[in-house]
Amino acid sequence: MRRCFRILWLLIFAISLADSYSRPGQSAEVNLPVIRPTEFPKVGKFEVLCGDFHMHTVNSDGRLTTRERVEECARMGYHIIAITDHRTTRGYTIAKHVSEQLGLIVLRGIETGIKGAEHINAIGFSGQYEPTDSHSWAEVPNADTVYYRDELREITDCGGFVIYNHLHVGFREPVEWGVREGIIQGIEVKNDVVGEGWNTIAWNGRHCYPDAFDYALKHNLTIFANTDAHVQRNANPAVTLVFTEARTPEAVMEALRARRTVAWFDGVLWGRKEILTDLIRACVNVSLSKGKEGKTFLNIENQSPVAFTAVIDGVSAEPVEIPAYQAIPIPTNTDGNTVRIRWTNIWINPTENLEITHPLAKSR
Ligand SMILES: [Zn+2]
Ligand SMILES: [Zn+2]
């Protein structure tokens, strides 16, 4: 009898342990060392989570196994991922299992598209979606392979969100149609893997898609910066910041559909003015203080993992760097109640920086 109780207790203990390892959306139960910090302060009611919605494993042409890929994501500080192998969702079950152990959110994903042309990622669809003729969709109906419009509608019917990837073939009718129909809702403005090729444009020393940024603003699409990792990621991989109401797959999908993202890559942020303004106001404190000998300092405190550069009206005409999670004092003669700052690594379109008038808290 006593032995029975002991076994029963052991069983209950084992179940509770297993449960704590499998609950989604909670802080990591299994901690892998994060090699780059990615924690942001809250922005109003939103958490700012780091996502990557484009990556490959050995299930297609990637080099890492699904487990290795998910563990790498955890080390890189991502909170949300979609594994998007070509033609298959085979890795999803393992990815989900490993992600839950690590406290990551994982969405179902696949990379597919039109024969010899556009690549798209579908993410967040249900298990009901069965991919047809991946990367071989026809541009006309009644061809040998599925008509792209039928397949895109099928993805949407299964709850999927469609992203136009690395626009190496530019903007052709299939994408224009998908956008008009509200089926293609997102676009990559940065893809780490394409390097200098694939129709990228050299923009302020970076290779990316400023024309996709313009297009996203014009057509109200969700902005993505993805890694498209095939081998191991570089030290500073692209990130899509997602402003979510909760750490759940449903909340992530809601945020993507509501266009609440910012692209973070190569030291810059690209996004809509409103959301970037909210982000900077939440991440940065600006105050005036008196130092020794009555000198006045403008203190800028950065509570985010992004290093910012700023040109400050009446204080510094040259960009000043405010490193991640640091505060810097800048000598000044200013004594006003506000200060106008142009954030020179934050862009509200490909040619315009974010500018904000910050209230000046006075401290001693
Ligand atoms: Zn691709
Ligand atoms: Zn890819």
Image (tube, rainbow, N blue to C red):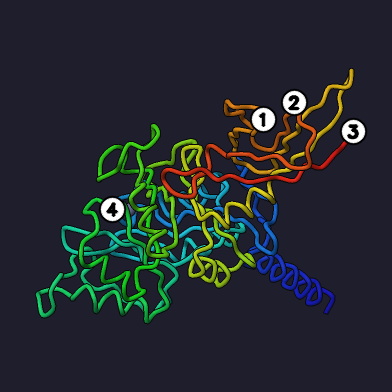
Which callout, 4 or 1, points at the residue further toward the start of the chain?
Answer: 4
| Disc 2: CA contacts within 10 A as few (<14), some (14-19) or many (>=20) | some
Name the quadrant of the N terminus.
bottom right
Give SS at disc 4: loop
Compared to 119, does 364 lie above or below? Answer: above
Which callout, 4 or 3, points at the residue further toward the start of the chain?
Answer: 4
> Looking at numbered disc 4 in the image, what kind of residue is underneath it?
Leu
Which callout, 2 or 1, points at the residue further toward the start of the chain?
Answer: 1
Which callout, 2 or 4, points at the residue further toward the start of the chain?
Answer: 4
Q: Quadrant of ligand 1?
A: bottom left
Query: Residue shown at 86%/24% (left/top)?
Result: 291
Calculate the distance from the C-alpha at mark 2 to the C-alpha at mark 1: 8 Å
The image shows residue 324 at horizontal and vertical percentages of: 64, 36
Task: Give left or right: position of 118 versus 270.
Answer: left
Residue under label 2: 332
Q: Which numbered disc, 4 or 1, marks the residue closer to the eye?
A: 1
> Looking at numbered disc 1 in the image, what kind of residue is underneath it?
Gly
The image shows residue 30 at horizontal and vertical percentages of: 65, 53
Residue under label 1: 314
User: Does the residue tagged 3 have its C-beta within 8 Å of any atom of ligand 2?
Assistant: no
| Disc 3: CA contacts within 10 A as few (<14), some (14-19) or many (>=20) | few
